[in-house]
Each structure stands twice: as C-alpha cells, then as structure tokens.
Image (tube, rainbow, N blue to C red):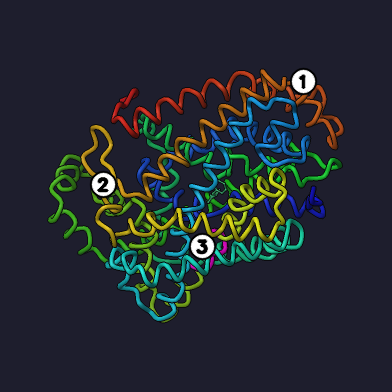
Amino acid sequence: MAVRGQFSNRLGFIMAAAGSAVGLGNIWKFPFEVGQGGGAVFVVMYLIFCFLLCLPVMVTEIAIGRKTQRNPVGAFNALGYKKWNFVGKLGIISGILILSFYNVVAAWAFGYVFEMVMGNFDIGNHFTAYTSDIFKISIYAVVFMVATAYIVSQGVSKGIERATKIMMPTLIVIILFLVIYSLTKEGSLEGLKFYFQPDFSEINGKVIYGALGQAFFSLSLGMGALITYGSYFSKKDNITTSASIITLMDVGIALIAGLMMFPFVSFMVHNNPQLISSLIESKADVAAIVAANPGMSNLEIFLLPEAGNSGAGLIFATLPTAFESMGAFGNVLGAIFFLLLSFAALTSTVSLLEVPVAYVVDEKGYKRSRAVWLMAGIIFLIGIPSMLSGGYSAFFSDFITYYHAEKSTGFLSFISDTASDTFLPLGGFLITVFAAYVWKKENLQAELAIGAPGFEGSLVSKYISFAVTVLCPLILGLIFVLTVLGKFFGVEVFG
Ligand code: PHE
C-alpha cells in the first residue's frame, strides 16, 4: 500500500481542519440563514448546536480516523465492522455531491473578483444573467476545480497543509479589515441591532433544523471529512482541545462574517431609502406586513423573507450595490471581499476532494495524482447540471417541485437540500450510534485519552460520553426526520 501522508504538527492539522470548516458556509450561507431565520434567535440556536451537539460528533470523527489511519470506508473495516462501512460510503457520496455544487458557487464568487475590479456593480441586478452565462461560469469552474486538484495532488503536508497555512491567516486579516471598515459606515448600528437582539417569538421548527443543518455543514461534519483529516493526525496530540479550537475558529469566523454583512446591508438601505418604498409598492405581502407592524425598521423590511433579499442572493445580488455606494474604493473593497470568499471556499473544496481521493488511494491502491485528477474530473461532470441550473437550462433551473411547495427548486439547491441538509445530519446520527453502541464508548474514550493527559475521568470526557450515547443520536435522529418531512413533504411538525 502507498505510504500515507501526515500533518507535520498540531498547528498544521488545526489549520487544515479549520480551513475545511470555514468556507462558503460561513461567509455566504450563514448571514443569509440568519437573515431568513429571524436574526439573533438563529444565532443563539446555532451556537448551542455547535458546542453541545456538533463538537462531540467532531471529536468522534477525528478519533475514528486517527485510530484506524484510514479513509471513511476503510476506517469501519479496520475497526472490524465491515457491515457499517455503508456509513463511510454515504459520507463519500455526500462529499462528491457537495463538492459538485460547491464548486459552482465558488466559481460564481471567483468570477465576481473580476467583475468588481472592473467596477461592474450593476451585476447584482443581473445575477441570473451572470449565472446563466455558461461560457464564463464554466471557465471559472474549471479553474477552481483545477486549483483544488493541484493542491490535493501535492499531498497532505506539502499540499493541503501548506496551502491552508497561507490562506487561513490571510483570510482572517481580510475579514477583520472589512469588519472594521463596515462598522465605520453610517447606519451600520442598525445592522448590529438586527444581528444581536434575539426575538424568541420567532423560534419555530424551520429555525431549529435550519440552525442544525447549518452547524453540520459549516463544521464539515457527518461525511467523514474529519475521519479523513483525523487519519493524518499524530497520536501525540490532543483531539478534544484541537476540535475545540477548530469549532471556535469556525464559529468565530461565521459570527464575524455577520458582523461585516449586516452593517454593509444596513448602510446600503440607509443610503437608498427609495429602495424600501419601491419594495413596498412592488410586493403586496411586504406591504401587508409593514402595515401590520408599524415599528419595523427599513433594514428589517428589506430583509423580510417575503422581500426576497435575505436569501442566497444576499451576497451576490445585494453586496455589489453596497460596494458601489462606498465611493472611490468600492471596486477594490469588492474585489478583496470576493477574493476572501474564494480563498475560504478553496480550503473547503480541498477537504471535500480529499475524502474520495483518500478512499481510492487506500482501498483501490491508486497513486495519489491519478486518484486526484480522476475524481476531480468525475465530480466536475456531476456538477454540470448544477451549473446549468443557474438559469441557462429551464429544465435544471426548475428541476423539481417538492410536495406542497409553491415554487420549484433548481438542481443545485436540490443537491444541497439532499446531500448537505439531509445526509449530513443522518451521517452524524449513524456515526454517533456506531461509536457509542457498536465500537463502544470505552474504545472512543481510550482513543481520546491518547495525547491528552488529564482527560480520563474529566468533566469533558463525561460530557462527551453522554452526548455521544444519548444526546446526539436522539436529537440528530429527530432532526433528520423533521428535515425530511419539512423540506420534501411540506410537513411542519412544530408550527
Ligand atoms: N464547511 C464547509 C463550509 O462551511 C463546507 C464543507 C462541508 C466542507 C462538508 C467539507 C465537508 O463552507
């Protein structure tokens, strides 16, 4: 068997895993989920899920990987439970599907760097025309996939670790700069208020499973990405503290991304009051809500789900106008922002590609470079319908209408609903059930104690045991069922 790579030290592992976690999920998806989930309530739910539910799952994945030094399928075999390797297979399929559409969104973001440089701010109003321009988008998508494949082909320490060690700190500097800048803008305080004041009356089933799905996706859990990265992690190091640092970094960057987005948006709303009046005029349901709630701020009106500005388009459709209002340096700022987004996406696509690559290398004996280019090619092809669903092909753009849904769902969103919102919580459920009841929690604890003096018998160790045996299987199982019912069948169990 080919020699397996290893991260050169703990920092390398943490940077790579945090690079996997921090991505479009934090900067693109998190703010719009917050916008749709009613602001701060969503944020509170998200934080609870990340630390109480997801962190134990993360620890379990890393432990399984490090114990077996195998890819997600090989890991179950190596532990002696071949029957359970379907969990690993589900993970690999999820990873392939997620990368297939993720690369398309990353390509949009990457293309925006050039649009901003050229000062083409109007693009926000023609977003569908942009995503339908299949010639341009496919070039960006090829470039992005090739960059991903190149990094992965260089191996674990020379490729993945080295690239993330450069990109992650750069990303943190850029995002902090943008936050400070956005906070100096007029009207930004209102954005902070929306972001930080929870209104608990807004909690409902959708907010809850939306927050959990987001936490899973954002932490790269439930598909074996961390089993794979864990398999390159040294036995000398502490799994629990490393996982805590990774979670803190991921949550921190998502929170900071909100800190940048909402002030930007509120600045823009502040500067274009006519935006709100034309919104109210053009949309009857918005007008009705405004009439019923006289105290609403312009920002709240703008971000109402009914107004259509808080969705997936928040970054692509809304931000260019915000950059335009920033005057002379608007195009530089815009370009920097989308470069940040592209970097964040690249460290995640790398981890998504590494999962199937590790599988083919470990189990089928392929050479790394051959495995990488083969997988990247296949995944690119699988992503073509997602690319076409941005408006170019009517068939893929209106691919499916879920039971009881008013509107159709495009192919890209359909794959995201299936692979990320549904398969990941299911994968998390199966992984914790396996670790607690098949592999047994004592074995999990024993692996966690390696490289972790003082872990045995500690409060943290007791909490992890409780979470993995009771809390995670229960809640993840429940949320999986609720997500399937709610998303695909329009059945909302909780109002
Ligand atoms: N966590 C990444 C993000 O937030 C997405 C991802 C999911 C990466 C699953 C790897 C595995 O963008």
CB at disc 2 and ligand 1 closer than 8 Å: no
Which quadrant holds the C terminus?
Answer: top left
Query: What numbered label is drawn on residue 341?
Result: 3
Seen in the picture, residue 464 relative to 9 is either above or below; the reply is above
231 on left or right of 89: right
Query: What numbered label is drawn on residue 442?
Result: 1
Which residue is at 28% across, 67% downward? 129
Residue type marked 2: Met
> Which of the two residues, 450 or 397, is positioned nearer the viewer here?
397
Residue type marked 1: Glu
Using the rendered view, name the quadrant where residue 457 is placed: top right
> Which of the two residues, 37 or 19, is positioned nearer the viewer here?
19
Mark 3 packing: few (<14 Cα in 10 Å), some, or many (20+)? many
Mark 2 vs 1, N-terminal side: 2
194 on left or right of 259: left
Seen in the picture, residue 451 relative to 116 is either above or below; the reply is above
| Disc 3 and disc 2 in contact, CB within 8 angstroms | no
